Amino acid sequence: MNDIPIETVPKRVVSLVPSMTESLFDLGFGDTLVGISDYCIQPAREVSQLKRVGGPKNVRIRDILQLKPDLVIANLEENRREDIEELLKNDIPVWVTFPKTIRQSLDDLWMLTELYHRQLAVDRMRSLEVALDYARLAANEARRVRYFCPIWEKETNGRRWWMTFSAETYPNDLLSLFGGENVFQDCSKLDPLLSFPGYVDEARFHGEDHRYPRITFDEIVSARPELILLPSEPYSYTYQHAIEYRKLFLKKTAEHFNISVCWLDGSLITWHGTRLAKALQKLTEIFSN
């Protein structure tokens, strides 16, 4: 967790992180935003009035500099190191967030709350902490559910494969709160066509993020998930995909075990920040059915 690199209340903020943009508005700090990324879409009415400065991988540095921000909020996973370094060279304070757990995400929000010194934010954060405590208590009574959650898919050499996430990620920590047990939480296989779960070729995949393994259909079946979650982002899974997956896995597994397939709003599991409040409501319904 990185500390916010300023000590005074910012008056001009640029957010390159959609979940943090939403969180700033939810906590009552939206009035200090002057620029956002192209992917910052919530809250819709409020962000429609703000200057766009490009996507996470193609930030327009010149546009940010023209806004003269007191603070830029970035994310280690989403934004390019070169862009962050360029901003720092121009004496722009950059707060690089990278929460991999619910607790780390909430700690980021608390740092913002302490920086701004607004009572509304304190009250909302306390309410969120209480809601989280109730969710943890309920989860202690819940049955563990083995799940598989793809976040991307592709075909290589005629073979279809999927990308998912391992234990060291925010989605994994969040879904475990509701009783979810990620069947690939210990996997780090980056070559989708290798048949050794957990395999990483350090030389071939130097610099790759091992927290997002690639797996094949047969490996999914062998892992025996009870539930397949199809999030709407980062890959655009739809209800139609859910129908396809039901047919796909029913044909392969009917004689052995049943797999449920559920489509969900991907932001509930990928957006850290105040969106946790919505996740606590919606994801409870999914895992209780």
Image: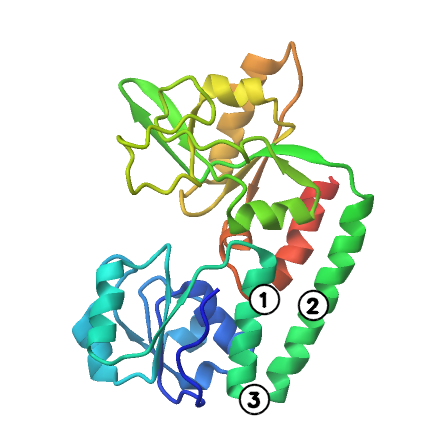
Q: Amino acid at mark 1?
A: Leu
Residue 30, given in percent of the width and then of the height, sits at: 46, 81
Q: Are marks 1 and 2 in contact (CB under 8 Å)?
A: yes
Q: Amino acid at mark 2?
A: Glu
Q: Which residue is painted at 47% across and 40% down in the image? A: 238
Count neighbours of disc 2 (C-alpha within 10 A) and say few if under 14, some if 14 to 19, many if 20 or more.
some
What is the x, y in percent for residue 9? 45, 89
Q: Position of residue 174 (x, y in %)?
A: 60, 50
Tell me the CA gap for discs 1 and 2: 8 Å
Mark 2 — residue? 129
Which element carries disc 1, helix, strand or loop?
helix
Q: Which of the labelled discs sits on residue 255, or is there none?
A: none
Outermost residue toward the right in this view? 141
Residue that badge 3 annotates: 117
Determine the image quadrant of residue 95: bottom left
Left or right: where 53 falls relative to 1: left
On the rendered image, what quadrant is the C terminus found in?
top right
Query: In the image, what residue occupies the spot 50% across and 77% down?
Result: 25
Q: Is residue 62 visible?
A: yes
In whole angstroms, how far apart are the C-alphas of marks 3 and 2?
18 Å
Residue that lies at the very extreme toward the front in this rendered image: 203
Whether 105 is drawn above or below 199: the answer is below
Residue tagged 1: 106
Q: How many marks?
A: 3
Answer whether residue 28 is visible to the viewer in this image.
no
